[in-house]
Amino acid sequence: MLALTHRRSAVMALAVATSTGATLALPAVLAHAVDAALAGAGARGVLPLAGTLVLLAGSEAVGQYAGPAISTDATARLREHAVRRVLAGSPLGAHRLPVGDVAARLTASAPQAALAAPAVVYSVAQLAMAVAALVALAVLAPTAALAFLGTAPLGYAAIRRQLRRTTRLGEGYQQAQADIAVRLLDAVSGSRSIAAAHAVDREIARVLRPVPALSRHGRELWDSQRRIAWCSALLAPATQLAVLAAAGTAVGAHALSVGGLLAALGYTGIGLGGFGAAQSLLDVSRARAGTARLTELLDAPVRAPGTRPLPAAAGGGGRLELRGVVVHGPGGPVLDRLDLTVPGGSWIAAVGADDAATAALAAVAAGLLDPDDGTVLLDGVPLPAVHPDELRTAVACAFADPALPGRTVADAIGLGLPPGPAERLHRAARAAAADVFVRRLPEGYRTSLSRAPFSGGERQRLGIARALARDARLLVLDDATSSLDAATENRVLQALRDEAGDRTRLVVTRRAAVAAHADAVVWLRAGRVHAQSTHEALSGVPAYRALFGGGPQD
């Protein structure tokens, strides 16, 4: 696609250059044809005039085709590049934008930014033609050029002022669009809760709150464009009349031929074509606004991929170490110089009153979030240094609200896995207590996800199955059983004990039953390890019991 775009850009540049040359030549060729006809030379000047017109029409047609094609290709490339940067960045990084905002930038800002190349080419060509036409007019009829300079600059000054205003308004308009998109996506994702709370009217009002700002920016944007059109429409005829008067006087004084008069009017029209550059300059302004909105996506920090392999997993491997890990949140550090070692093959439960701290622990342990300071190692290798393919094979995750991408249920469980026997997915689903409800679906594991509205607990079991299906040395579960009933949770926990084999398990939880199954519990407080022992030993502490609703915290 990039090579095709380069070819189209070259074609467009050649077409615009040809069109510019033909346009500048047209008044002179026309003047020659008219003077030749008046002198009785017959149609001697017709052929050059016809050739110039054909060249002009052909180049204009090619340019009009190439411009939109270039913008379309640029839009596709910008969207692809932005999506890659967004998905390649840390999924929990501080730079992350709301989903609705990202969608608005991809759908609205990318096409605006893609206008840049054609708009700049046309703007430069039109302004260059205007300057060249003025020079030609000065050579042909100096008084006519002075008349042109007496009126036209006022229009250019007014247009330039409005263009600055249009750029600012365009940015505000796109921001208001993004605000509405963010609020709407939030409302749609929480529609059941909103309806249950009888808050539909209030939520509609919240979603539509940015609409007046959007309307105001839209009206002001169109008003700015109207002013530009008004300036062009008013000053262009005034300039033409002034030039016509000056050139007519020159014809009356025999200082200019009739053909020269036509040429002067032609160059005046080309010079006034600089007003026509206003639309191209408006496109440049819109492109600048769109580019400013895309920059935050395109400049999102992306960690350079690691290259080191993990050592052979002797005895299962999976030794996890956190050394002086710091993760900052909006109100300060959520992990504060945290030191923690999870021996290979062990099961450690992480608990704490601060959900942000335990979630950050799970994220840095899984390599989904780079700590602001400190080091996270898996079997002695820092996670950022591990090759991404090997890291995602070595670490499997399950979450409280897992996403289920793919076309079928089997696709959702096998996400990211190479093609293999279906029994691998079925065995993982049985271990996660998911096989029983999957087989009741119309087509079992081949059922389309769009036809399978799962409950929260069923989604969690599918997420756990997806983690168990991977041949990972480290399993990280972030509150992944919070929606399960006690009996199902017990089955899943037993599977984590029996089916996980010698894998290392780090389980963030808010449930006492999960902590009780673990080999040891890490109790986080103030971003550090407050205590580490068995659940039974820690249960004698009232503040620990309070983490599970068992009493007041101190």
Image (cartoon, rainbow, N blue to C red):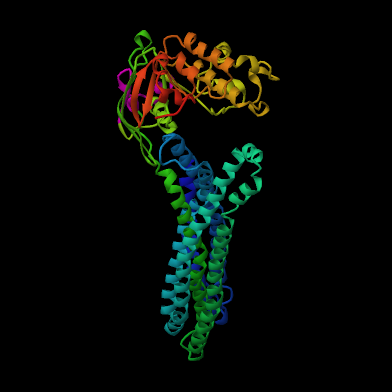
Residue at 54 percent across and 29 percent down: it is 401
Q: Camera-side residue: 450 or 137?
A: 450
Residue 378 against residue 23 in the figure, above or below? above
> Where is residue 393, by image quadrant?
top left
The residue lying furthest to the right in this view is 442
Residue at 32 percent across and 35 percent down: it is 372
* Residue 439 on image: x %, y %: 66, 15
Q: Camera-side residue: 41 or 148?
A: 148
Is residue 536 magenta-colored? no
* Residue 89 on image: x %, y %: 42, 36
The answer to whether residue 47 is seen in the rendering is no
The residue lying furthest to the bottom in this view is 253
Residue 114 against residue 340 in the figure, above or below? below
**First to last magenta residue range:** 374-393
| Count of marks overlaid on the render | 0
* Residue 371 on image: x %, y %: 34, 32
Q: Is residue 246 left or right of residue 206?
A: left
The answer to whether residue 434 is seen in the rendering is yes
> Where is residue 131, by image quadrant?
bottom left
Residue at 66 percent across and 38 percent down: it is 196
Q: Camera-side residue: 461 or 166?
A: 461
Quadrant including the C terminus: top left
